[in-house]
Image: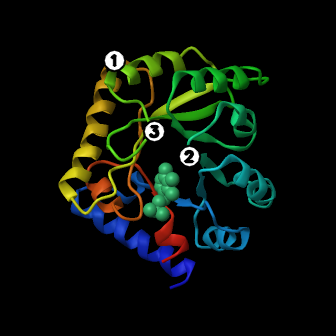
Amino acid sequence: MGIPEAVETIRERIQKACSRSGRKTEEVRLMGVSKFHEPPAIEEAWQAGIRLFGESRVQEAAVKFPDFKVKHPETELHMIGSLQRNKAKIVTGLFDMVQSVDRDELIAELGRLTGARKNPMINPLMILLEYHTAEDSKSGYPDLDSLFRAAEKALEFPGLALRGLMTMAPLTQDEAAVRASFRAMVSARDALAAHFPAVDWSCLSMGMSGDFEIAIEEGSTLVRIGTAIFNP
Ligand SMILES: *Cc1c(COP(=O)(O)O)cnc(C)c1O
């Protein structure tokens, strides 16, 4: 199967998962996770209709995406991997969103950098707070308290636009454990939305190649698909 067929297959599976759970297909965005893949493959995914891409390494994205974005200005690029503070400057110049915000000092650094923009509120950097819902992932805020503090911190910076949460479920065949992880996300989002009603919490980034249908059934609004698109 080539990339276009793989994208088509994923779209059909998203549709089915949506109709099973009484949701509209438009509620779920499809990201192509293009890490480790070269520009020709990314171009193929674009031709198949993918507009949102995810990368997990700043250096790699900085090589691949500047030219690609010139060619395809409607490209939206999200950072999904762990981010060191000394790379934050490159990130604010290249990415539209950082999904992997996992500590307050990173919020402060991204906020400082975007605050120096001319009109920080007109062109903000979107961020998601990464929630650690599974033992085998290393990153993410560990609990609700830390998420509350992070949200408060993010609201200090006019150049940051908080849009929701991101998580990685455990890599296991145990469906109950995967569901538990996604349900923890939804309940954290509900608690945060009750406490910070002015924030747009609409983005729930959860679900990868192995578990995106379960994630959609549990309320995901953005699925991050690498293997099933680029190495089907
Ligand atoms: C690599 C990666 C993905 C994509 O994983 P696949 O299983 O290849 O679909 C999604 N999210 C994050 C954070 C990743 O690092």
Residue 21: where, in percent of width, then height? 23, 57
Element on which disc 3 rests: loop
Q: CB at mark 2 closer than 8 A to ligand 1? A: yes
Please name the residue that numbered disc 3 is placed on: 139
Please name the residue that numbered disc 1 is placed on: 195
Q: CA distance from mark 3 to mark 1?
A: 24 Å
* Label 3 Cα crowd, 10 Å radius (few <14 / some 14-19 / many 20+): many
Residue 26 lies, with reference to residue 84, above or below; the image says: below
Residue 181: where, in percent of width, then height? 27, 45
Checking the image for residue 52, the label placed there is none
Q: CB at mark 3 closer than 8 A to ligand 1? A: no
Q: Which is more N-terminal, label 2 or label 3?
A: 2
The label nearer to you, 3 versus 1, is 3
Q: Which is more N-terminal, label 2 or label 1?
A: 2
- To which quarter of the image does residue 85 belong? top right
Q: Which is more N-terminal, label 1 or label 3?
A: 3
Residue at the (61%, 20%) spot, across then down: 108
Element on which disc 1 rests: helix
Q: Is residue 195 left or right of residue 29?
A: left
Checking the image for residue 81, the label placed there is 2
